[in-house]
Image (cartoon, helix red, strand yellow):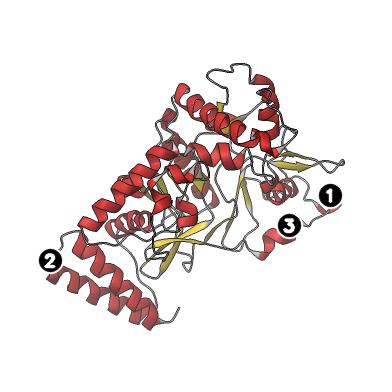
Amino acid sequence: MNNSLLLNKALKFLFQYGKESGLSEETIINRQHMIKEEIETTGTYTHTLEEITYGATLAWRNSAKCIGRLFWETLDVFDARNVNSQEDVAKHIHHHIHHATNDGKIRSTITVFPEISSSQKVQLWSPQLIRYAGYQKESGDILGDPANLELTTVAQNLGWQGEGTPYDILPVIFQWNEEPPSVVPIANEEVLEVEINHPINLDWKPLNLKWYAVPIISDRYLEIGGLSYPAPFNGWYMETEIAARNLVDSYRYNRLRDVANQLKLDTTSTTTFWRDRALVELQHAVYSSYRQAGVQMVDHYTAAQQFQTFREKEEKLQREVKGDWTWLVPPVSPALTPIFHQGIINEELSPNFIKHKRPKLFKKISEMTESSRPTGCPFHS
């Protein structure tokens, strides 16, 4: 990014930050002058902790695909820009999981690593800090999560070995500068998981359904004022994310027919509406299981109403809310929520979260043959 473009983005953010934070016009102008001189001298600039904190909350407020933006001001921000080793990065990863989980009382959290153009560069390869492995069997069937087949292969080629269950917790993989990738094992005790049972049809144990408590996204950059930071972040689950997508999508766990069979539904024809009936019961099971386990979760009706409240609050402040309707509308009973019946302009504002591409080395390692895997795994940390 050239200096002129970076400066424009920086000044725009600093003006918004200053105005919304109640800073005086003189304070804002002085800070803008400081940044202008820094960019002209070095080609970049450094955010203060207060700017990083507010920028991260604004990124949540601006997230077009997020239905849970009512709580954007409650984000816990951890500044990890001063890390200087793989060990430091690993400590922050473990800390984020622990802090966010909070024994089920989920805390919205973001950990901000050094800016991508800095001398200390962190590249997170894992799409989430917590993910289940996926294994391709000789029969062609997949054990575990098909979405993570390639990530699992990379982890194995870097020396990690799973237990071969449908819910093996993958390590977090990241690269420090241009060094070989690091593998951060995530112990089972670190991850709060919820077994899924039905509050009425109580014999669901044979289905062996479960999911983890906290979705910690790690394949996005936090963009603030033209600078981009690797920054894992999380909110909490809406029940449809697990019960209508992760456990049901044909390219994920694909368990809807199993649920229908457990409920003894007639699956011989789509006109028995067995898919719809099984899907609703699975929503009920997931939501009630999380509540029973004391793990924070929101249902799609409450989430939709919370979004309406968020939108009304923003409009009173004369801030138009942008959004991606296709993501905001819940995948189950969308017409029963107010969002379905309203239009919204889809536009990406700044600050925001920008998806990044995996490095070429990721693909190279995923294609390693068994004979070329490293022995003793020098990448392991």
Q: Which mark is residue 248?
A: none
Question: In the rendered view, does 183 fall on the left or right side of 164?
Answer: left
How much space separates mark 2 and mark 1, taking CA atoms? 62 Å
Tell me if label 1 and label 3 are in contact, CB under 8 Å: no
The quadrant in which residue 319 appears is bottom left
Q: Which mark is residue 365?
A: 3
**Mark 3: which amino acid?**
Ile
What kind of element bears circle 3?
Answer: helix
**Image quarter hosting the C terminus:** top right
Element at badge 2?
loop
Q: Which residue does the image show at 55% across and 47% down from the upper left?
A: 128
Is residue 11 at least partly visible in the picture?
yes
Mark 2 or mark 1: which comes first in sequence?
2
Query: Closer to the camera: disc 2 or disc 3?
Result: 2
Question: Which residue occupies 57% across, 22% down?
Answer: 197
Q: Position of residue 354 (x, y in %)?
A: 48, 62
Mark 3, residues whose alpha carbon is within 10 Å: few (<14), some, or many (≥20)?
many
The secondary structure type at the circle numbered 1 is helix
Q: Which residue is mark 1?
A: 370
Q: Which residue is mark 2?
A: 24
| Residue type, mark 1 in image | Glu
Give the camera-side residue of 297 and 369: 297
